[in-house]
Amino acid sequence: MSERVSRARRNPSENNNKPASRAVDQERLEAAVREILLAVGEDPDREGLRETPERVARMYAEMFSGLGKDPRIHLAKTFTQKYDEMVIVRDIGFESMCEHHLLPFMGKAHVGYLPNGKIVGLSKVARVVEILARRPQVQERMTEELADLIMEELDARGVGVVLEASHSCMTIRGIRKPTSLCTTSAMRGGFLSNQSSRAELMSLIYGSRTS
Ligand code: ZN
């Protein structure tokens, strides 16, 4: 059985030039950040903080730029290919924002699927991860959304998604465990019903890992 293991590393500079598809209310964001500063007892008009509301507003626009974007468009263009072995895209870096604390969580996504005559460009999987990440998120939900999208759009025979991330809300506040890593997985189709397919997927994701 031959497998194709592919790595797609997202180039962070790739998306920086694109404006958010949906304009955020910059003024409202700035006013809100100013309120936060006032609420914690700061002086938002002192020199160091004067431009902070504007900067933070721009940052939020970027972090939430996946809102209003449809990830399905990246999976719409598929190629007909008689290839029915596992396809794996490993180590897709992502940065997201925990919707409970509005603090970042970041890590890697690994996606495997069993094609059903249709394959998709490997970079497209990374695009989908990017759109799902750039929203207020919960890692568990993001994992399931990613699996369902690929399953549905590619009409795949199976999909397995594993996300590993470090959550700022766990590392810098509350329980403060700086080395903790949260792993979530979602299995669909053949990866759910067939234990050996699932084991093979896991060994391809983790097998040759050096770190
Ligand atoms: Zn959180």
Image (spheres, rainbow, N blue to C red):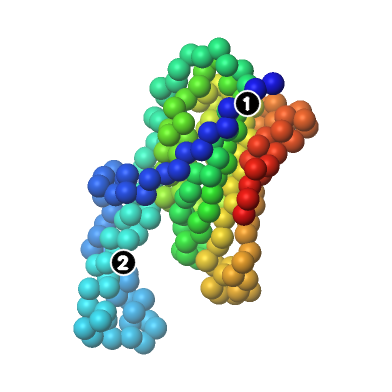
Asked which secondary structure carries label 1, the reply is loop
Q: Residue 199: x percent and y percent?
A: 74, 36
* Residue marked by disc 2: 56
Q: Is mark 1 within 8 Å of ligand 1?
A: no
The residue sitting at 59% across, 52% down in the picture is: 164
- Could you tell me the amino acid type at mark 2? Val
- Nearest the viewer among 199 and 162 is 199
When the figure is inspected, residue 166 is found, relative to residue 153, above or below; the finding is: below
Q: Decide: is 178 above or below 40.
A: above
> Can you name the residue that lies furthest to the right here?
195
Is 211 displayed left or right of 32 in the figure?
right
Q: Quadrant of the C terminus?
A: bottom right
Mark 2 Cβ and ligand 1 under 8 Å apart: no
Write the residue at 33% across / 86% down: 42
Horizontal side of residue 51 vs 163, given as left or right: left
Residue 168 at what x, y percent from top left? 52, 66
Which of the 4 quarters of the picture holds residue 4?
top right
Q: Within 10 Å of the Cα at label 1, are there few (<14), some (14-19), or many (20+) other Cα atoms?
A: few
* Label drawn at residue 208: none
In the drawing, what numbered circle is on residue 3?
A: 1
**Residue shown at the point (53%, 44%) measured from the top left:** 91
Q: Earlier in the sequence, mark 1 or mark 2?
A: 1
Q: Is residue 141 visible?
A: no
Where on the picture, by quarter, is residue 11?
Answer: top left
Amino acid type, residue under disc 1 in the picture: Glu
Q: Is residue 160 left or right of residue 74?
A: right
Residue 1 % position (x, y): 69, 21
Q: Quadrant of residue 111?
A: top right
